[in-house]
Image (cartoon, grey):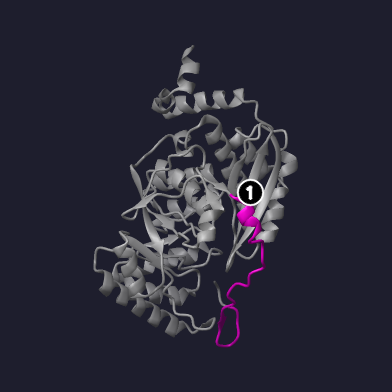
Amino acid sequence: MNRRAFLLSSGALLALPSFALAQEAGAKARTFNLKITGLKTVIVNVGSVNWVFCKVLTNEGLTGLGEGSITSKEATLAQAIMEHERFLVGKDPTDIELLWQGMFRYPRWRGGPILNSAISAVEIALWDILGKALNVPIYKLLGGAARNRIRLYLDVGSTPEAFLKAKEQGYTAAKSGFIAVENDLVIPSYAVREGAKRVEAVRKAVGDDFDICIDAHGKLTTPMAIDFCHRVEDLNPLFVEEPTQLEDIDELELLRSKTRVSLATGERSFTKYGFTEYCRRHLVNYVQPDVCHAGGILEMKKIGAIAEAYRIEMAPHNPQSEVSTLASLHVDATTPACTIQEYSPRSDQWIQDLFYGGAVKVKDGFADLPDRPGLGVDLDEKVAAKHPYKPVNRPKYVFSDGGVADH
């Protein structure tokens, strides 16, 4: 047996330096002569949202699973994913960077939530195929672990009881949307004042050493954002997320100059290009790419590298399914800048039955590193078929004069 054969057939593969590992992995994958034969989408209704999954099919029966779930535009996203089929069929699924560049650049019209989420879903599935083909977790192919476990924060309600429950479960941080909006009506003074009071009540309940994450969710006007951040500064939140809208980055710079509270944003930003200015200008303390929207696994890894270069921390956005969570964890495991990960577990039995292969393993508020080949999870299409796509109406916030408010 020659050196390459030995390395590829034994645990020695995992001991190689990352560059050599990538070379050996690519050589091994090419020996399979894998070719993409088609794409498939599956949309699953989960009450107030729909999850959109992508399967990449190959000539050897090996399939990859990805996710691009995006609220309000799920049916459009599924069609956007399928638009890539004519480009991908016949290609080697392990040429991930080359295929990503083709999907992103060849159409000329690029960017935005639909196109990038479609690419993300396909790209995650390609990594799943590569990991399965080589029988290693994806993070091993990204350079290996930069940490032993991954800190999580839990999405919860805005009451002290909800945060205390998270603390009792062993988490050291949790997030909620505290901005007070009643019956879709935004009254600026009330929304800010009551929102800050809710944060204060939670801080009193959990103590000083539990991290409170605040999701403003783009609801604030510029004056509201400045006022709210001033009110919560002494409550020491881990960050205030999406305090401004994306259209004017100078609005975020203005807020940055007006408050000392930690700021975070990025769930609606795409690719490395959408994050560079946040980091270069130090406008936020945390960037929050979503692996399902920002461009997929490797693109989120690149975003993390940009953040690391500017000493910005990464806290990936992740309100989606087990697929999104595991894809995120593979990147988190290898990215020094990633210090905490959003986690939104679902307790419904049918949702747990929807996935098989390996759930996220959580202990004391930290996730174990993924340990199964590829992504580490698969989709039960029989369960999915029982919960087909349903149009979902999103909140329609208004001001007291009837004008449209952001969300």
Residue 73 found in image quarter? bottom right
- Left or right position of 289 against 96: left
- Residue 85, given in percent of the width and then of the height, sits at 72, 43
Q: Residue furthest right?
A: 86
Q: State yes or no: residue 398 in magenta.
A: yes
- Residue 402, given in percent of the width and then of the height, sits at 60, 85
Residue 211 visible to the viewer: no
* Residue that label 1 marks: 54
- Residue at the spot x=32%, y=59% of the render? 171
- Density class for disc 1 (Cα within 10 Å; few <14, some 14-19, many ≥20) is many
- Please, what is the three-letter code of the amino acid marked with disc 1? Cys
- Left or right position of 351 against 199: right
- Residue at the spot x=59%, y=77% of the render? 396
Q: Which image quadrant: the C terminus? A: bottom right
In this picture, is 159 found above or below 43?
Answer: below
- Secondary structure of the residue carrying tag 1 is strand
Range drawn in magenta: 380-404
- Left or right position of 297 against 204: right
- Residue 279, given in percent of the width and then of the height, sits at 43, 52
